[in-house]
Amino acid sequence: MTNIAIIPARGGSKRIPLKNIKDFLGEPIIQRVLKEIHSSDIFDQIIVSTDDEVIRQVVENMKFVDIHNRPSSLSDDFTGTQAVIQSVCNELNLGDQDNICCIYPTAALIKAETLHESLLNFTNSDADFLFSAKRFEHPVQRGFCINDKSKLTFVEETHISKRTQDLTEMYFDAGYFYWGSGIAWKEARSIISPANEVHIYGALESYDIDERGDWTIVEKLARILG
């Protein structure tokens, strides 16, 4: 049994061009993430799966990284991450019992100790997957939508008048990392499932970068957290 990290790094980001290699506090963000993964000293192999020549050039000099050539059929805007990891597992003939961790190349706040802790929790469980999650800061039960006529539609109108402390805490996929067995990835088993395990991040311990403004926020958090 081995521990393998797979970093899916496609080149075609639309909202933030060249997102996976954009400068983050003086270095390409993917390099920052790869260095932290390597420093955890728990991985027998670290693989970057990419379709992009520029990304390949950025990481190929990192001697601890292997590069997987992501096929063009899995490089469009609609292919999910799970299909990419499945492809790497099958093409590289990774073991069914291997512990395989998918880590996003923009997970700039990821820490080696988190990878240690989450691996231990995963291997001590019977789950197919362990994934990172965060708590919604405000109860989603009191949320609402606004249509093009500025009319409100409540998610759960019966909860609008309730106190926040009386509502059940809700969580969401943090989009940082996913541990899974080789066979679970190959068979594309469900990741977000009641049968699986969760690593819960604190409010400022992780932050998903989707928009340009998120980049500035994460850089500030990185400076604070060290």
Image (cartoon, helix red, strand yellow):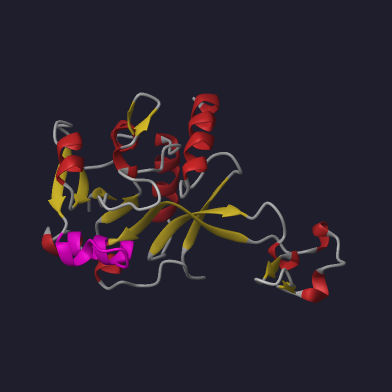
Above or below, 69 relative to 26: below
Q: Residue at x 45, y 40 (%)?
A: 114
The answer to whether residue 79 is seen in the rendering is yes
Let me know if residue 78 is in the magenta part.
yes
How far across and how far down the image is residue 64, in percent?
A: 18, 35
> In this image, 164 relative to 144: left or right?
right
Let me know if residue 74 is in the magenta part.
yes
> In this image, 96 relative to 188: left or right?
left
Q: Residue at x 18, y 41 (%)?
A: 54
How far across and how far down the image is residue 8, in percent?
A: 27, 52
How far across and how far down the image is residue 136, in percent?
A: 64, 55
Above or below, 77 relative to 7: below
How far across and how far down the image is residue 129, in percent?
A: 39, 62
Count of marks overlaid on the render:
0
The answer to whether residue 95 is seen in the rendering is no
Q: Quadrant of residue 89?
A: bottom left
Judged from this view, the residue extending furthest toward the front is 149
Q: Main secondary structure of the magenta part?
A: helix
Above or below, 197 relative to 177: below
Q: Residue at x 54, y 32 (%)?
A: 221
Q: Nearer the viewer, residue 149 or 106?
A: 149
> In this image, 133 relative to 68: left or right?
right
Q: Which residues are magenta?
A: 71-88
